[in-house]
Amino acid sequence: MAAASARQVNIAIIGAGGVGKCFLSQLEQLAARRPSPKLVLTYICTSKKAIYSTDHVAIPIGTVSSALASSKQAPLALPKLVDFLGTSGSKTVLVDNTSSQDVADAYPLFLSRGISIVTPNKKAFSGSYKLWQDIFAAAEQSGAKVYHESSVGAGLPVLSTLKDLVDTGDEVTKIEGVFSGTMSFLFNSFAPTSGSGGKWSAEVKKAKELGYTEPDPRDDLNGLDVARKLTILARLAGLPVESPTAFPVQSLIPKELESVASGDEFLEKLPAFDAQMEETKAAAEKEGKVVRFVGSIDVATKQVKVGLEKFDLSHPIAALKGSDNIISFYTKRYGSNPLIVQGAGAGGDVTAMGVTSDLLKVLSQIA
Amino acid sequence: MAAASARQVNIAIIGAGGVGKCFLSQLEQLAARRPSPKLVLTYICTSKKAIYSTDHVAIPIGTVSSALASSKQAPLALPKLVDFLGTSGSKTVLVDNTSSQDVADAYPLFLSRGISIVTPNKKAFSGSYKLWQDIFAAAEQSGAKVYHESSVGAGLPVLSTLKDLVDTGDEVTKIEGVFSGTMSFLFNSFAPTSGSGGKWSAEVKKAKELGYTEPDPRDDLNGLDVARKLTILARLAGLPVESPTAFPVQSLIPKELESVASGDEFLEKLPAFDAQMEETKAAAEKEGKVVRFVGSIDVATKQVKVGLEKFDLSHPIAALKGSDNIISFYTKRYGSNPLIVQGAGAGGDVTAMGVTSDLLKVLSQIA
């Protein structure tokens, strides 16, 4: 066992994909910039490989990529990882840069052993309400911290702002916004505030080509990603939402294409359904409005919903650009003009930034 | 001396005006909601009166107003207050709800004695650069914390967002925005994006009647309030700005009215100068733009400036409503679309909210 040190914090990382790589780069800079507390990477794994040593020797952050590539070590099973981290003698933060439900399910175990967690993984906070309760109960009992800013809006200050509103006693009445970079891009192009925009299927194809959609665009168009984010926000606002399927979520996948075999086949057949979206767009235009894919939470009536809505051209949601997210908090203190946060809500660097700033918050409290 | 307790934090408050009253109400709710750490008010004063006891007995928060009214105690001189708080045996947070330069000047003394500070007072952070350095050096040395979110944009997450960007290694290239609720209201009414707006002097008069200006509107129109906020942001972004008068600040007070005796006389004589502002508005309109009073920081060229600028009607700064603030952070990670924070940037409740959330941040680290 390594010697305990009050001014050393061990870091364990699961996941070294897009966000994971950006986070490693930010962690390396951070460790170089801030001498105290000393940040020591003692474990990192992908789904297939790992680097660690039984005596918790520091892993040089700059060489992780190549070391992982040549590593012969397999990842530790999650309960074994909990034991490994829990016996290091140093305070430890687990950075979960995956979107794995399995890792999420193990959070209560990590937290109950005093291991803090920072993560962009939505699964833990938008899964069953029981898991949500178990996570925060375990943290409360052990004093370990858990932060997940990047689970909604990537690095944008969304969850921290909502927590500040709630914790200082404001009354949040409504939360509304565009929570998906993909949906933002699609509707800003399909139904722009000036000009006429392209055909729906063409915009989806373009978004996929630009890398703005999941490999199968249906994973964006089904609305589940937005529903997960709404679940997290609703729970932080005090609504015990059972799951992301416990409220109305409008899917933009035509019924007939729900079960086609592949994303490619879906894209091929989508043009046949353009008339439907064209009609929705025209109906909005007739009222001098544009259509957008939004999520909203009415706290008083406990209504959460995700789907298409029409907005005046002067509304901030209509005026959104590129693939930006926008989140409006309506509260008692802020009155009729909401507190608004806006900007890129996806991308490796800004997602990792949310994780890094969460790590800094944890360090300021445990180190 | 009261017995030391790890789970008790003493609170001392200077100032019980608009923001101070709102903060007291939020503190009372907070103390009732959160049993740990126990928050104990041991000192509160206005400019003329105080409540405290030599043995640091808890002051009931709910009765502070009436107790202050009937109090015969005078405020302690600041060095005496430092001694009083420093010898309580409990961790202590000073809440400075004034806009006093004297109190600000004493921050290094409080901090060096381990007393943390939360405040909306701009003076400490926008005064001389020496004071800024002394404050953070004292905090660094003693471990005491100092937070001042409400010194820019009231409760909006402006400073915390900038700090997160900087601390996680993003490169802030430019900060731009409307930083004064008064200026926002004036220009949103004088040069609206649709319709023609009123005469300048009439809008200033209306703003004063609605309570949106200082008693003498020249204290808003001289631009110094915005310059102070820009000074704070520039310093946090890494520019060692010497003072709020060290960069160009455009005053909207006609030269001829700078030295008239009173705000009332100023308002009376202002209509004679309407043509000037009318011309500025017309020049912007000719380009299809509107004029706004903004502050901007170009980090690369180290240029800070405050004054009138023209904006396209579709620009978020042009589309602002009411007396809202808007702050855009342009950074390397966020690329061409900035991270934007928008909402009410003045008012007792939202200013106090920034102070209360700062207090919660301090408590999470010291208690």
Image (cartoon, coloured by chain):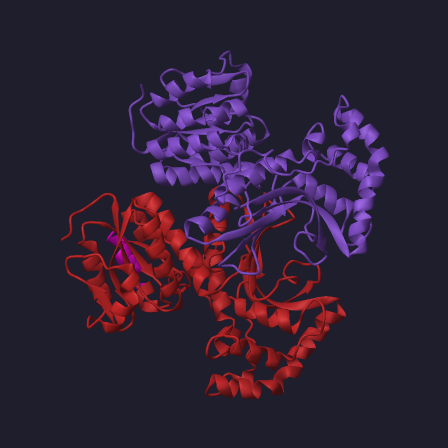
Chain colours: A red, B purple
Q: Is residue A211 above or below residue B82?
A: below
Q: Is residue A84 above or below residue A164?
A: below
Left or right, A134 with respect to B275, comes to: left
Residue drawn at x 45%, y 25% is B60
Measured as percent of width and height from the top left, residue A70 is found at 23, 73
Q: Is residue A34 above or below residue A106?
A: above
Measured as percent of width and height from the top left, residue A283 is found at 72, 73
**Camera-side residue of B12 and B180:** B180
Residue drawn at x 50%, y 78% is A218
**Camera-side residue of A163 and A52:** A52
Q: Is residue B275 above or below residue A270?
A: above
Measured as percent of width and height from the top left, residue A62 is found at 30, 61
Measured as percent of width and height from the top left, residue B364 is found at 37, 41
Query: Where is the C terminus of chain A found, in terms of image quarters?
Result: top left
The number of callouts visible is 0
Q: Which residues are magenta?
A: A105-115
